[in-house]
């Protein structure tokens, strides 16, 4: 296994202007791993409750996603309820029910400890640090976080940032972390905290990658069919890290291609609720959309 993700597996209740669905498969590790599995071998460390359908686990198995690190506990699965407005921008969180996630203490299976690529999804920075203590010498560690941890565990988060290579967050998180409203200045301040690369996810406005003095931007694909934006960020991260792990990327052009792959895979996720679009996604669809993507801003 080349790539490990530690994060949430969830049952989401989602309302968008196009419908409402109850208790559908969600969670950062779910979106991330399904996206990454299009490019490399991926394994999950997460916890689910007794109500988590076995059929969901079968979906991951059909994609050859390693589930050794997924434990099933007594109690209910983590649940999140979100509602999106007409602009399909940031959702209102209507409920967060931690359930078995409350006592999540990631235990990395011995067979994963030599993994080369690690993604720490949005979990308590103390748990992110615990994961880093359990893996030996990964080539690249990337992580996500959210405003809640920026506000409530800033010291622990700063320790994580000193140990990771890549940070993937959205623009409000970038501003909050840096305490600076201008995105480019904020990005520089975040890079000074440790990561070599910062990816700022900007929803329908695409993703910006900052590294050293370089800035690279990939747009979001202009879709006719946006139904549910949930998981776009985690899917982006899965496509990005999956491509890097699958190809052992070390060069700047490779990282740029990884950003485009992240944007391409995320563009499919939002076309339906939950992971439905990812579940049936083919490599051919990815390469076709990748080519359309490149055409978006070419002038000849
Ligand atoms: P995204 O839209 O990429 O930010 O990811 C949405 C997913 O994150 C949903 O499927 C939720 O189940 C999951 N999620 C929401 N809140 C949290 C949280 N506090 N911790 C972990 N996962 C969460």
Image (cartoon, rainbow, N blue to C red):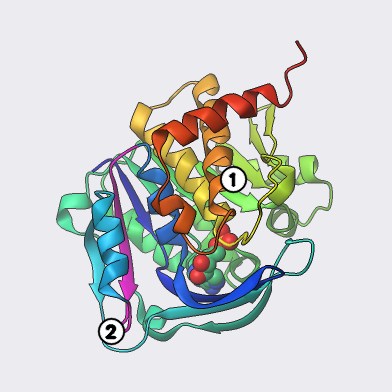
Q: Report whether 178 appears left or right of 286.
A: right
Against 72, residue 157 (above or below) is: above
Judged by depth in the image, the label closer to the viewer, 2 or 1, is 1
Depth order, front residue of 110/225: 225
Residue 202 image position (x, y, % from top left): 71, 48
Against 101, residue 207 (above or below) is: above
**Where residue 74 is drawn, which disc sits there?**
none
Residue on which disc 2 sits: 50
Q: Report whether 4 appears left or right of 228.
A: left
SS assignment at label 2: loop
Segment tinted magenta in the rendering: 40-52
In the image, is residue 67 part of the stretch drawn in magenta? no
How far apart are labels 2 and 1 at the CA level? 32 Å
Q: In which quarter of the image is the C terminus?
A: top right
Q: Which residue is drawn at 52% across and 34% down?
A: 261
Q: Residue at x 48, y 80 (%)?
A: 79
Q: Is mark 2 within 8 Å of ligand 1?
A: no
Q: Residue at x 38, y 52 (%)?
A: 33
Q: Which residue lies furthest to the right in this view?
A: 182
Depth order, front residue of 95/131: 95
Q: Quadrant of the N terminus?
A: top left
Residue 296 image position (x, y, % from top left): 71, 27
Q: Residue at x 40, y 34 (%)?
A: 283
Residue 41 image position (x, y, % from top left): 28, 42
Residue on which disc 1 sits: 267
Identify the mark nearer the N-term, 2 or 1: 2
Q: Which residue lies furthest to the top in this view?
A: 300
Q: Report whether 286 appears left or right of 299.
A: left
Q: How crowded is mark 1: few (under 14 residues within 10 Å), some or many (20 or more)?
A: many
Q: Is residue 106 in view? A: no
């Amino acid at each position: 296994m080349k790539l490990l993700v530690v994060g949430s597996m969830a049952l989401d209740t989602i309302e968008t202007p196009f419908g409402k669905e109850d208790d559908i498969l969600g969670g950062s590790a779910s979106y991330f791993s399904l996206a990454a599995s299009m490019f490399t071998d991926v394994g999950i460390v997460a916890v689910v409750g007794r109500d988590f359908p076995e059929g969901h686990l079968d979906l991951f198995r059909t994609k050859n996603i390693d589930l050794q690190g997924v434990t099933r506990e007594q109690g209910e699965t983590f649940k999140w309820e979100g509602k999106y407005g007409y602009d399909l921008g940031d959702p209102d969180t209507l409920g967060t029910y931690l359930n078995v996630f409350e006592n999540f203490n990631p235990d990395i299976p011995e067979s994963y400890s030599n993994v080369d690529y690690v993604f720490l999804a949005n979990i308590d920075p103390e748990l992110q640090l615990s994961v880093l203590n359990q893996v030996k010498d990964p080539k690249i560690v990337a992580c996500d976080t959210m405003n809640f941890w920026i506000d409530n565990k800033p010291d622990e988060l700063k320790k994580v940032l000193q140990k990771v290579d890549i940070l993937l967050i959205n623009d409000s998180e970038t501003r909050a972390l840096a305490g600076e409203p201008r995105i480019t200045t904020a990005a520089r301040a975040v890079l000074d905290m440790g990561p070599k690369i910062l990816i700022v996810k900007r929803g329908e406005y695409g993703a910006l990658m900052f590294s050293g003095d370089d800035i690279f931007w990939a747009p979001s694909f202009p879709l006719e069919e946006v139904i549910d934006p949930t998981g776009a960020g985690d899917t982006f991260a899965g496509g990005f890290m999956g491509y890097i792990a699958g190809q052992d990327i070390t060069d700047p052009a490779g990282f740029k291609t990884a950003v485009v792959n992240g944007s391409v895979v995320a563009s499919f996720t939002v076309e339906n609720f939950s992971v439905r679009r990812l579940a049936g996604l083919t490599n051919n669809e990815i390469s076709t959309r990748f080519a359309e993507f490149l055409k978006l801003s070419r002038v000849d």
